[in-house]
Every structure is written in C-alpha cells, then in structure tokens.
Image (spheres, rainbow, N blue to C red):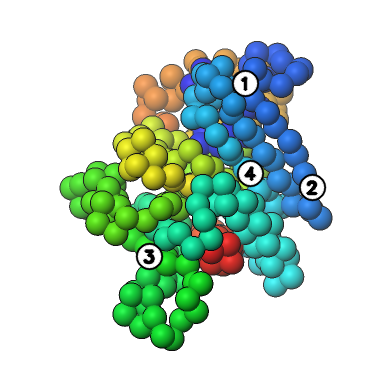
Amino acid sequence: MFFRTDMAVERRDLYRTANKLESEVEGIECEEEKIDDILVTRVKIINEDGERALDKKRGNYITIDVKKINNITTEKEEKIVNVFSNELKEIIKKHVNSNDEILIVGLGNLYATPDSLGAKVVQNIEITRHIKMYLPEIIDKNTRSVSAITPGVLGTTGMETVEIVKGIVDNIKPKLIIAIDSLCSKNIDRINKSIQISDTGIAPGGGVGNKRTDLSEETLGIPVISIGVPTVLDAATIVLDTLKVCDFEVNENELINKMKLNNFNFIVTPKEIDTLIDSITNIVSEGINNSL
C-alpha cells in the first residue's frame, strides 16, 4: 500500500479503512489520551507485520493534535508546550541518561517557508556545548551539553544530509540526535496543527516522494528522535476530499495516476504559512528546550 503521508497515525487509519478492519492492525499497538482539548495518540509498531502494514520502522510514534496553532492565547500555547515536552522527555529517557550530550539537527530549507521549520527551530535552541567546554565556571555542572546544526539541502550543499551529520557525529560523539523537519499529511485538518515525535529516525523528503538516505541509528550509530510537523499535502488529497464532500465516487489510484500524467501532482501549503510556521516554531523550540 502506498501512503502519501509521513504521519504514522494516518497510515494506521488508512490501512484499517483499506482493509476494512474493525480491530487493531496486526503488529500495531495504539492508545489515545485527551489532555484538556489536546489529543495525544501513541502508535507503537511492535513487529515485522506492523512494519509491513504501515511501511515504517519498528518503534514509537506519538502524535499531538491541537485544534488551532495560529493566534492562540499564551495559556493555550503553554499547555501545548507542556504536553509536547512531557512526551519528548519520556522518549529521550528511554535512550540516554540525563547528562548525555545531544545534537539537534534542523532539516529542510530555510528559504522555502513550508520546509523551513527545522532551520528556524535550531535558531531558538539553547546551545550549551561551547559554554561547558570553554566557560564551565559560569554554568551548572549538571547542565546537559547541547549542540546544533542546520545542514541545508542537497541542492544547495551538494552533500547528502546524512553525510554531513555523520561527520559531525564522528567528531563530537553525541549520544543522541533530535532531528526536526516539515512533514507531509493526508489530512487537511492536520496541517500545522499536529506534532509527531518518533524514535525511529527520519527520511528527509519521504512524504513528498523525494526520499533521501535515513537519519537513523543504522546510518549514524546513535539513536535518532525525529520531531515533525505537517506543513504540506499533495493536490490529490484536496481533490479527493472535495469529491467525497460532494458525494462523488472516485477511484483514488486512478485519479492520482491521471494527475501525475497531466503534471497536476502539486504539493500544496496554506496561504498563511508564514505566520503558521512562526507559531509552531515557537512551540517546538520551547518544548525541546524544556525537555532538555
């Protein structure tokens, strides 16, 4: 089954619908928790059956859904940050100790707004590695060492992201990587309104059909936690949803193939993407800082 989404929770729902399943997908565990009006869905792929069903690696995928990101109150933003940082803390604790060094990697293209999330988040991260190295007397000895990099994209560097990050890992030897990237969704309601946390790494460009080499424990030798926010979806999704609302029957695969043949398979983002990215950047960066 081909999925046009990076979101594990959406892949689970699509697989269940396509196979007319009333029970859980074989190899998948899922639980939901409502925290005020924030929905947290924890999908865990536990074996090869689950990997094949969702075409994702074995591990944990946590989705935090909020109704609104833009123009929210300070109180609501704090609630989202707290929920996000608490979920992130729990995953970090599974892989490293409290004083182990962490490298933050901001993926994407700073100059393409829907793809700029990772680079913008890195600008707001509280970096401590250089202070611990050169001015240890002015910082608490229990402070975690945190460094960060924005490696750019293949088209501007000529290097695969994994090549750049591997060189850094080999030199500074962090114990864990946190990679932040923009994602592709299958659901209009999730665009800039969801945060996915995973401990299985990430494949840059995977959701838009431009998959690069994974950033993962297999390629880098250390655990990789990914944080992603869906900022785009493909045009076929919008067309399909519109036809369904109008009660038209349509063959999804046939429609997608026709759109591709006619060069209509665009990747789409909301017109207010600039302000949306700024809002979600603040939430993600503050949540990471809190969790570290």
Q: Looking at the picture, how far across and down is residue 64, in whole percent? A: 66, 48
Circle 1: element type: loop
Question: In the rendered image, which residue does mark 2 sit on?
Answer: 34
Mark 3 or 4: the one toward you: 3
Q: Which residue is nearer to you in this view: 8 or 112?
A: 8
Mark 2 or 3: the one toward you: 3
Considering only order in the chain, which callout, 4 or 1, is on the residue closer to the N terminus?
1
Real-space Cα separation, disc 1 to disc 4, in angstroms: 18 Å
Left or right: 135 with respect to 189? left
The kind of residue on which mark 3 rests is Ser
Q: Badge 1, how many Cα within 10 Å: few under 14, some, many 20+?
A: some
Is there any visible trace of residue 116 in the rendered image? no
Left or right: 139 with respect to 18? left
The kind of residue on which mark 1 rests is Gly
Q: Which residue is nearer to you in this view: 165 or 65?
A: 165
Q: Which mark is residue 291?
A: none
Q: Residue at x 45, y 59 (%)?
A: 100
Q: Badge 2, how many Cα within 10 Å: few under 14, some, many 20+?
A: few
Question: In the rendered image, which residue does mark 3 sit on?
Answer: 147
* Mark 1 vs 3: CB contact within 8 A: no
Q: Looking at the picture, how far across and down is residue 132, in whole percent? A: 38, 75
The kind of residue on which mark 2 rests is Lys
Q: Badge 4, how many Cα within 10 Å: few under 14, some, many 20+?
A: many
Question: In the rendered image, which residue does mark 4 sit on?
Answer: 63
Considering only order in the chain, which callout, 4 or 2, is on the residue closer to the N terminus?
2
Is there any visible trace of residue 32 in the rendered image? yes
In the rendered image, the vertical position of residue 55 relative to residue 280, given as above or below: above
* Mark 2 vs 4: CB contact within 8 A: no
Question: In the rendered image, which residue does mark 1 sit on?
Answer: 27
Q: Looking at the picture, how far across and down is residue 87, in whole percent? A: 64, 52
Left or right: 172 with respect to 285? left
